[in-house]
Image (cartoon, rainbow, N blue to C red):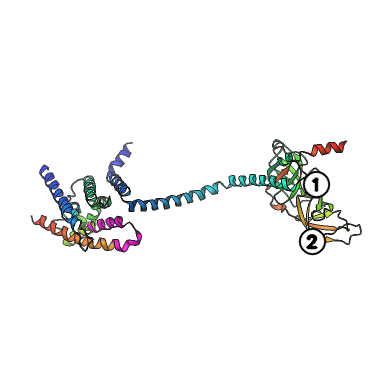
Amino acid sequence: MNRELIGNISFYTIILALQLLVFNQFQLFGFVTPFVYLIIFIHYRISYDKTVLLLLGFIIGFIIDLSMQTYGCHTFSTITICYFRSRIEKSSFGVNANLPLAMIKGTPLLSRVSFFLSLIVIHSIIYYSFIFFNVNLLSTIFLYAFINSIATFILIWIISRLISDR
Amino acid sequence: MQSIINSIVKNRNLIIYLILSFISFSFLYNNSSLHFNEFGKISTYLSATSSKFSSSINSYFNLKSENEKLINENLQLKKMESKHRFTQINEDTLNSIISATVIVNSINKSKNIIIIDKGKLDNINLEMGVMSSEGVVGIVKSVTNNYASIISLLNTDLKLNAILKNSSTIGSVTWDGLNARILKLNDIPLSSSLKVGDTVVTGGMSFYFPKGVPIGRIINYDNNSLEGYYEIDIEAFNDFSSLSNLYILNRTDNNEIQSLLDE
């Protein structure tokens, strides 16, 4: 258990460091910064406590906010996907949702893509809604969320494959 | 208590989510000027909408008190108006206008009376003149502690001193018991000049009303009478069927005049 915990903490730290030091410097098309740290919530084991997930989401979101000067936008979007994660899982994986690591190994590709995309898209839409915070800019919000989601999805998918292969 | 605790434990994730969301919003609100302004706009809109809603509900429930306020205001205006119009009355008299509400009213008899919600305890006495915002209504006929009855102008027993406003010709107003809007102006000699539309006001030659309180306007007259007087129909300014708030004039100089007459 302790080993697993240390492993998890190391994983979270590495991802967080990657996000802060590498991906935050990314400016795809001049405005897209992939949110690779979302991989933490995608790979969070469902057998763990949901409350811990919420607190983890809050802490990580808060750290990202501090580093990007986004003042709570990441925090709110992160805790929201953490809170709704189990529902998104159920809608993506159906009956397999409760199996540990079901979303990573031995699950249909479509379910996995659906799960990854759902979390990423919901997060991006909430994030950009709060960044622009203007109803008149709905099209811009969706455009940014769309491009950001694709970039984030590709990177998270690649990292997930690397972890999985390892 | 146990069920409350169970409920909190059961919904702890929702509660934690809401608390964390609140912290996020506070962070956003306190540090970002854009969000501060936008939240400010939303807050202003919400508070304005809710205030408008509650104020419309309150104003509905306050209608009664608003009405009372308006009556009092009207009373004050009446007093101020009297100060300018009824120059023959002294200052003390002006302070003695009392407002009252009609509780019983009739117009379909030959001797109609009105009952108001003020009586002896409110300083209402016999033979006080009663008027509305439109003009003369009648005279106080009897008083109990809390109520008073008024002989309405629509009472065939009442004969009120009146003059033509333009010519100051003296006459008297009565009611023939037929039409609730039409009164009769009597005792105007054929030598006087008058025309339809002339205003009839109180003559001031009685204990009841000072000079100049409006009664009605001439709508028809007949100068073919053999008795040497016009037969004049006047339309009362008051609609006696819809009387609501009345003003009772307390002429404090009545006793003084009466004592002179007694001598």
What stretch of residues is rendered in magenta? A120-141
Crowdedness near tag 2: few (<14), some (14–19) or many (≥20) residues, C-alpha within 10 Å: few
Discs 2 and 1 share one subunit: yes
The residue pinned by badge 2 equals B196
Cβ atoms under marks 2 and 1 closer than 8 Å: no
Instruction: Tell which subunit mark 1 falls on.
Output: B
> Which residue appears at 80% of the width and 42% of the height?
B207
Left or right: residue A135 compared with residue A28: right
The residue pinned by badge 1 equals B204
Q: Position of residue A44 (x, y in %)?
A: 18, 50
| Callout 1: SS | loop
Q: Position of residue B261 (x, y in %)?
A: 86, 38
Name the residue nearer the viewer: A147 or B238. Answer: A147
Label 2, label 1: how far apart the Cα atoms are: 23 Å
Name the residue nearer the viewer: A115 or A34. Answer: A34
Name the residue nearer the viewer: B80 or B177. Answer: B80
Left or right: residue A118 compared with residue B252: left
Instruction: Tell which subunit mark 2 falls on.
Output: B
Q: Quadrant of the N terminus of chain A?
A: top left
Left or right: residue A133 compared with residue B202: left
Residue A81 falls within the magenta-colored stretch = no
Q: Position of residue A81 (x, y in %)?
A: 25, 53
